[in-house]
Image (cartoon, rainbow, N blue to C red):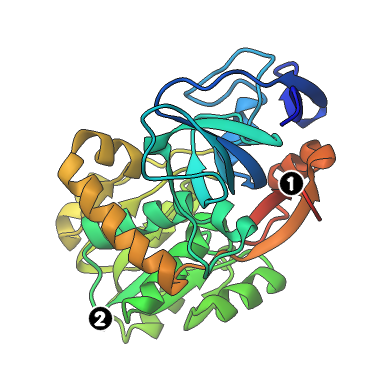
Amino acid sequence: MTNSYRAAICTALTGPDSVKIEQLPVKPLKPGEVRIAVQAAGLNFPDLLMTYGKYQFRPEPPFVPGIEIAGEILEVGAGVKDYAPGDRIMGGSKGNGFAEQIVLPMAAIRELPSSLSFAEGACWHGAAITAWHALNDKANLSEGETILILGASGGVGMAAVKLAKYKGATIIATGSSDEKRQAIDQAGADHSLDPADPDLAATVKKLTDGKGVDVVFDPVGGDLSITATRAIGWGGRYLIVGFASGDIPSFPANHALIKGYSLIGLRAGESGRRDPILAAQSNKSLKCLAQEGVMRPHISHSFPLEQAGDALRVLEKREAIGRVAIKMTI
């Protein structure tokens, strides 16, 4: 093992242009830790926000972005019994993933099933746990129900499309270009629509024979959220997943009262931290889903570590369809 490794380091809070490749020293493992040779890192919007200092977790430069990785174990620390060098794993943390190596506590890693490549594994868990928590724990989406998935060409949105399909729901989804809508269709959507269509709500109502959808999955926010409330049916469940548009909507409380629908906020990671029983149940379910290849990520762009800044720019320009990955070997 060498004494140093390469990493993509955010050197200033000025965005992707500040990301530079530097050498970092290899540090000894503490008990319970695992050293991993990173094979791939999955990009998430928080990675981009951190390079501007705009995420709720705000590390000061210099720091290494990257909250999801997959790779092979190089070394295990004292007390680690469930893993050994050579094991394929996927894992996550608050950062440090855009590097040739990462050290994680044993609790932060999980087996990478043979059904997923390293790049797919690096892009799987974050989106999968969000979609699972939303559609299973919060909305209890059932076979035969209809769901409207906004921003369906994003990583979380596409995971929701694939999970909803797996659950037997009818899926209406939005994508802002022909290319994105084609990818959404291939992921399993029954109907893909342009979110800019001024008649979007009416079209959704028509597709549901005037009833409206049972569930709305909304990682977008902004004006599109208000449009979606007009497409929800009586007693529906509106899942507030995030605000990728940058605008936080103000929902009309009287409208929710009249139509009897529920506004449901969700934070998959925080829910697991606060409810260990739920976390254990989710991990068991997700392990089975990963082994089956459910929610296999669609990766539209892959970059070498040297182009980590370019990878982040793809997110910034909203050019990604599904996920973006950094691969140590292209």
What residue is rendered at 32% in x and 87% in y?
Answer: 209
Up the image or down, 133 lies above or below 177; here it is above
- Residue 294 percent across, percent down from the top left: 44, 71
What residue is rendered at 26% in x and 40% in y?
Answer: 271
Q: Nearer the viewer, residue 196 or 271?
A: 271
Give the amino acid type for the residue marked by disc 2 in the picture: Glu
Q: Nearer the viewer, residue 105 or 263?
A: 105
Residue at numbered disc 2:
143
176 displayed left or right of 174: right
Q: Quadrant of residue 100?
A: top right
User: Of discs 1 and 2, which sits in the foreground?
Assistant: 2
- Residue 178 percent across, percent down from the top left: 70, 74
Q: N-terminal of the two: label 1 or label 2?
A: 2
Mark 2 lies on a secondary structure that is loop
Residue 317 has which mark? Answer: 1
Up the image or down, 305 lies above or below 207; here it is above
Up the image or down, 117 lies above or below 324; here it is below
Q: Nearer the viewer, residue 15 or 90?
A: 90
Q: CA distance from mark 1 to mark 2?
A: 36 Å
Q: Look at the image and tell me in which quarter the N terminus lies.
A: top right
Residue 149 visible here: no
Mark 1 lies on a secondary structure that is loop
What residue is rendered at 76% in x and 31% in y?
Answer: 16
Dots 1, 2 in contact, CB < 8 A: no
Mark 1 crowdedness (10 Å alpha carbons): few <14, some 14-19, many ≥20:
few
Residue 308 visible here: yes
